[in-house]
Image (cartoon, helix red, strand yellow):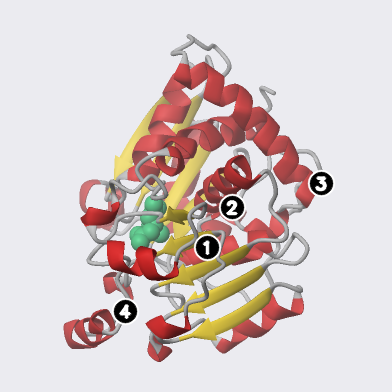
Amino acid sequence: MYQITSRLQPDFEMICGNFKGKDIVSLDQFAVADLDKLFTVTRQMKRIAENNEPSRLLEGLLVGLLFFEPSSRTFSSFAAAVKRLGGQTIEMQNPEAFSSVSKGETFEDTIQVMEAYTNAIVLRHRFSGAAEQAARAANFVPVINAGDGNNEHPTQTLLDMYTLHERFGRLDNLTGLLAGDALNSRTIHSLLRGLSLYENNTMYVLSPRQLQLSRDDFVSLQDRGIRLIEIHREQDIPHDCDFWYWTRVQKERFASAEEYRRAQSEIVVASPALLETYAKKDMILMDPLPRVESVDPAVDADERAVYLRSQIRNGVYTRMALLALVLGRI
Ligand code: NCD
C-alpha cells in the first residue's frame, strides 16, 4: 500500500497573474487579480459551451483524470471541459482496483507514469495532502487538485465563487450561511479561503457541534479577516443572507456508521419551510452536490435554488478556463 505523507508547511507556488504550468492545489495560491482573470476567461468559455462552438484551444493536448475516490460532477465536468476545447483525456477511475496500484505500485510511480502520457493531471484522492504530494512527484506537468480528503477542493470553489460573482456582481460585502459538515467538507474549507480574500464578508456556519470547523481552521480563517459566526440551531439562522451553501454530512470520513447516523440526525435540512422562514427573496441556495438528505427535493422548483441550474453549469466553464490558462493556451 502506498503512503501519503503530510507536510506541515505547504510549498505550493502563488499564481501571481501567471497560471501557465502551475499546480493548482489550494485556494491559498490565488489573489483577487488571479480570480478576476479566471472569471474573464470563464465568460469566454461560457459562450463557447453555450453555443456549442467547436474550439481547438486544447487541440493536441491530453489531460489525465486520475480519480482515486468516487465522483460524478467533478469527473464529468473536467472531461467535458477538456473535450469542449478539443483536447483529449485519459481516464482512470478507482485505480486502486483497476490499475497497477492494486499490485502495490507507489503513488509517486503512478503519478510519474501518468505524467509521461499527458500534459496535465487532475487528481482526486481520499487523503488530505495527496494533491500536494502528487505535485511534488510530477516534474513535467501541472497537477490540479480535484478534491483531497477533507482538505480542499479548489476547482469547486472557483465555480462557486464565479456563481456568486455572476449573481451579485461582487465577492465582497456578502453575508452567507454555510451549513452541514463544516468539519469535513473540503468545499466549505476552500470556499472560506476564497471569500477571505475579499473585504467585509460575514459567514454564518451552521452545523452540529461535532461537525463545526476544526479550531485550527476557525482561527486561521478568522485571522484573515473573514467574519465567522458559528451557530448550531435553526432558530439562529439570520434573515439577511445573500446566499446559503448547503453540504451533506461526509459519511466516508466517519469512523463508524453509528457516529455518522448520530451526526446526520442533528443537521438542519434545507426545505421549502426553512426558506420561507429565513431566506430573502433575492438570495441563492447553493450546494456542491451530492445532496444526501440535506436538501429537500421540493426546494428544486424554487428559482433561488441554483445547484442544478447555474452552479452545475459553471463547473464546466470555470474548468475550461482553468485548463486553458494552466496549459498556456490563453
Ligand atoms: C463535493 C466533494 O467531492 O467534495 N462534491 C463535488 O465535488 N461536487 C461535495 C461532496 O462530496 O459532498
Front position among marks 1 and 2: 1
Report the image quarter containing ligand 1. bottom left
> In 3D space, how far apart are the residues under numbered discs 3 and 4 (Cα atoms)?
39 Å
Task: Pick the residue in front: 70 or 205.
Answer: 205
Q: Position of residue 272 (x, y in %)?
A: 29, 61
Q: Position of residue 299 (x, y in %)?
A: 29, 55
Is residue 202 left or right of 31 when viewed as pictured? Answer: left
Does the residue at mark 4 contact the one at mark 2 (Cβ under 8 Å)?
no
Q: Residues within 10 Å of mark 4 (few under 14, many from 20)?
A: many
Q: Given the image, on which type of amino acid does mark 1 rest? A: Glu
Q: Residues within 10 Å of mark 2 (few under 14, many from 20)?
A: many
What's the mark number on residue 16? 3
> In 3D space, how far apart are the residues under numbered discs 1 and 2 (Cα atoms)?
14 Å
Task: Pick the residue in front: 146 or 304.
Answer: 304
Does the residue at mark 4 contact the one at mark 1 (Cβ under 8 Å)?
no
Instruction: Identify the residue position indicated by label 4 in the image.
Output: 267
Instruction: Identify the residue position indicated by label 1 in the image.
Output: 152
Q: Given the image, on which type of amino acid does mark 2 rest? A: Ala
Task: Pick the residue in front: 27 or 19.
Answer: 27
Is residue 97 left or right of 141 when viewed as pictured? Answer: left
Q: Position of residue 180 (x, y in %)?
A: 39, 73
The number of numbered badges drawn on the structure is 4
Point out the image quarter for the N terminus: bottom left
Callout 3: helix, strand or loop? loop
When asked about the image quadrant of residue 222, the answer is bottom right
Badge 4 residue CB within 8 Å of ligand 1: no
